Image (tube, rainbow, N blue to C red):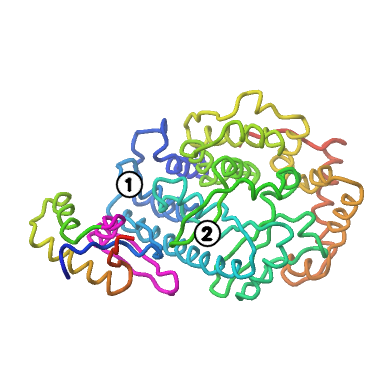
Amino acid sequence: MPDRERYRRNEQVLWRRTGDGAVLARPDGDGFERLSPTGAAVWELLGEPASVESVAGELAEIFEGKGSTIDDDVASIVEQLVERGLVEPDDGV
Amino acid sequence: MSELEALRAVERRIASFGLPGAVEQPLELTDERWTVVGFLLELRSLTGLALAAAQGGALRISRDATAELVERHRAQMLHALSLERLLLRVGDAFGDRQIPFVVLKGPALAHALYPDPSWRPFGDLDLLVRTPDWRAACSVLAGLGFRRGLPEPVAGFDERFGKAATHTGPGGLQIDLHRALALGPFGVWIRPEELFDEVWELRLGGRMFLRLNDTALLLHAAVHASLGRAEPLPMPVRDVAQVALAGEVDRARLADLTRRWHLAAVVGDAFAVAERHLGVTLERPLTADDLRATARERRALASYQASRGVGGVPLAMLRAVPGLRNKSAYVRSLVMPNREFMAARAGGRVSYVSRWRIPLRWMRHRILRGNRLTTKHTAR
């Protein structure tokens, strides 16, 4: 997953904060996706189009974590969200 | 303070969370207390506010109680998301039949007025359609597998006098299909045909819907808090404060609608109840002159409150319905509803005796209290 590519939430996905993360609902499905607190933080930061690098940078600032570990975690979370159709590459439109 | 009063005090404290002027001293609850309060908060749709209060330090509960609150809140959020998913589906179906509709209450308030939609859970969808579209909208819902709970008492009642009908879907989700905002006289005075002029856009799931604008939303919140039940629930009361606080209310328009829709007593009452229940002072968007209610409006309000259980609303409705022919049709529908309506209402039994229980109670009430319908206000 290229670090500089920008991603954003799929705007059709419905979601809510739950206190220990978030729950997401695809418009045409029956089930729900549950996000951990870190997953929910990534999801929230993708409310505006952002690269994995910039999301990781913001999370590192919030959690005062080490850059490379957070980079890997965020890349993995974004990849999973993209695979599930919850997040999509931002084409700038 | 009785147990009931103590629980009410807790739910009102939670309902006031985040409002300017609300009590700042943290509310501390033991685990023993939590066993009842946790259940109550879920029942009253207050888990979002309670969780925000716990995270902000305004509600102090144990780690176990917090974990339970998170579970209860998640269940409410999943329900809200299921309803929003249903809204997308129903929106498509109404769109196919070219039936415009307005999203009322829950989703509209959650997304447009609260700082976080998770603060405002909701238990069903409330959708408003124009009266001429009523039958088509009901048939769209039937086509999606929804069943109406209570049939109309006589043919044509819905369009002439009805407020809403509850439809239950295959998965148990419910839609209240409205053609008016209230039962009784205020349902007549709040002109349904004008509501579609008071709308803004609501973006949800990448789609565009209609909701009431903040001015009409404030009036609807007041109607719901003041007329919905004899004892107002905390969430509708919070809605009044929330819209007053965060809404972009057009004061001139609000004054005009309040006057023309005869809502001065209702708005005044809703603000007073919100301030008393939530312990805050709200800035009034209307002047004392705007809120000066006529005797007729005050009497109508009392019919939903002090005389609610003794047929107050139908009587007040009878006074408000214009024209002798309409009044006579309304009385006929009350006195001789069809068998399907009575069977649905009585859970299968068709009994004109049970149908007359409320009118008989009302007559007994009048005889015992003198020949005058009470308009006494009780402290709520």
Q: Nearer the viewer, mark 1 or mark 2?
A: 2
For this rendering, which residue is in front, B23 or A43? A43
Q: Secondary structure at mark 1?
A: helix
Q: Mark on residue B123?
A: 2
Residue plotted at (53% across, 69% down)? B89
| Residue A52: x %, y % from top left | 18, 61
Residue B12 drawn above or below residue B110? above
**Where is residue B319, by image quadrant?**
top right
Residue B335 pos. (x, y %)? 87, 57
Quarter of the figure that contains the C terminus of chain A: bottom left
Q: Which of disc 2 and disc 1 is earlier in sequence?
A: 1
As for residue A22 lying within the magenta part, the answer is: yes
User: Residue B373 lies in what quarter of the image?
Assistant: top right
Residue reaching furthest to the front: A93
Q: Chain of mark 1?
A: B
Residue holding disc 1: B54
Q: Is residue B352 magenta?
A: no
Q: Residues within 10 Å of mark 1 (few under 14, many from 20)?
A: many
Relative placement, left or right, of B284 versus B180 is left
Q: Secondary structure under badge 2? A: loop
Q: Are marks 1 and 2 on the same chain?
A: yes
Q: Which residues are magenta?
A: A21-49
